[in-house]
Amino acid sequence: MESTYLYLLALICVLWAQGQVQRAYQKYKRIENEKNISGADVARQILDANGLYDVNVEVAQGGILSDHYDPTKHVVRLSPDIYYNRSIASLAVAAHEVGHAIQHKEQYGFIAIRNKLLPAAQIASKLGWLTLFLGLFFLYITPVLLYIGIIMLVVIALFQLVTLPLEFNASSRALVQLQQGSFVNEDEIDDCRSMLRAAAFTYVAALLSTIAQILRMVLIARRNDD
Ligand SMILES: [Zn+2]
């Protein structure tokens, strides 16, 4: 029974966070910024101000909020709305992605830790759910597969954990850059902070959801032992 509650808790957590970021995005993409500057322009100017002339700014091919920094190609990719619009959301998201580029240049410590975990996390996210499914299926024969699945979930949780400081740090760099470059006024910086905070919630929710799943599987495994 507790395991069902944990599952629902994880689900509610993730849905709530996704709702928050969508609400914030819908709100702040409609508010024009006072400087009338696009996401692409603010990204270019902050990159140049930090000597990152070799980092390009491109339109991302994915959909809404597919914005990211690609460290292998040295490219900041912004979704079309963020790239072209002159909204508060454009400022916040573009500056956040440039924040990741600055982290890369400065060899920010958590990048190395995350890169070490990346191969294991990729395997775990590909095979984790299949392993857990088979683990539950064969539980009455052997609990080994379920335990392997739980270990994979722990690897995913660790990866999500080290992602958090990277995300929070990129956002705080973004706010500093937006203020230093005078891209925002007093009210706008608060709005940018709200937008980025909502975006960070999704990473926290993802971690909490994985932890809930780990607890759920441990409960199931222990019940079987009894
Ligand atoms: Zn980020």
Image (cartoon, rainbow, N blue to C red):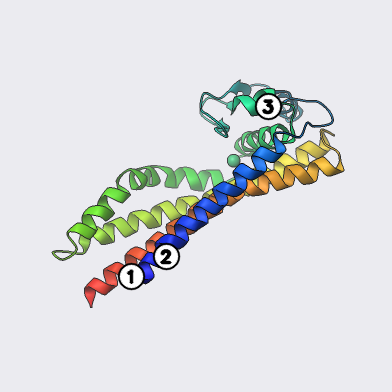
Amino acid under disc 2: Leu
Which callout, 2 or 1, points at the residue further toward the start of the chain?
A: 2
Which mark is on residue 219? 1
Q: Nearer the viewer, residue 111 or 95?
A: 95
> For ligand 1, which image quadrant applies?
top right
Do the numbered discs 2 and 1 sit on residues whose CB atoms are within 8 Å? yes
Q: Is residue 114 above or below residue 211?
A: above
Q: Is residue 15 above or below residue 34?
A: below
Instruction: Give the foreground label among 3 and 1.
Output: 1
Q: Is residue 18 above or below residue 62?
A: below
Q: Is residue 8 found left or right of 179 in the rendered image?
A: left
Which callout, 3 or 2, points at the residue further toward the start of the chain?
A: 2
Which mark is on residue 107? none
Label 1: state its secondary structure: helix
Q: CA distance from mark 3 to mark 1?
A: 50 Å
Name the residue carrying label 2.
6
Residue at horizontal 84%, vertical 28%?
Answer: 35
Q: Is residue 180 found left or right of 65 in the rendered image?
A: right
Residue at horizontal 63%, vertical 39%?
Answer: 103
Q: Is residue 60 above or below residue 104?
A: above
Q: CA distance from mark 2 to mark 1?
A: 10 Å
Amino acid under disc 3: Leu
Label 3: state its secondary structure: loop
List x then y, in percent, for residue 97: 63, 35
Amino acid under disc 1: Leu
Name the residue carrying label 3.
52
Residue at horizontal 39%, vertical 57%?
Answer: 154
Instruction: Give the foreground label among 3 and 2.
Output: 2
Residue at horizontal 62%, vertical 37%?
Answer: 100
Q: Is residue 136 found left or right of 57 in the rendered image?
A: left
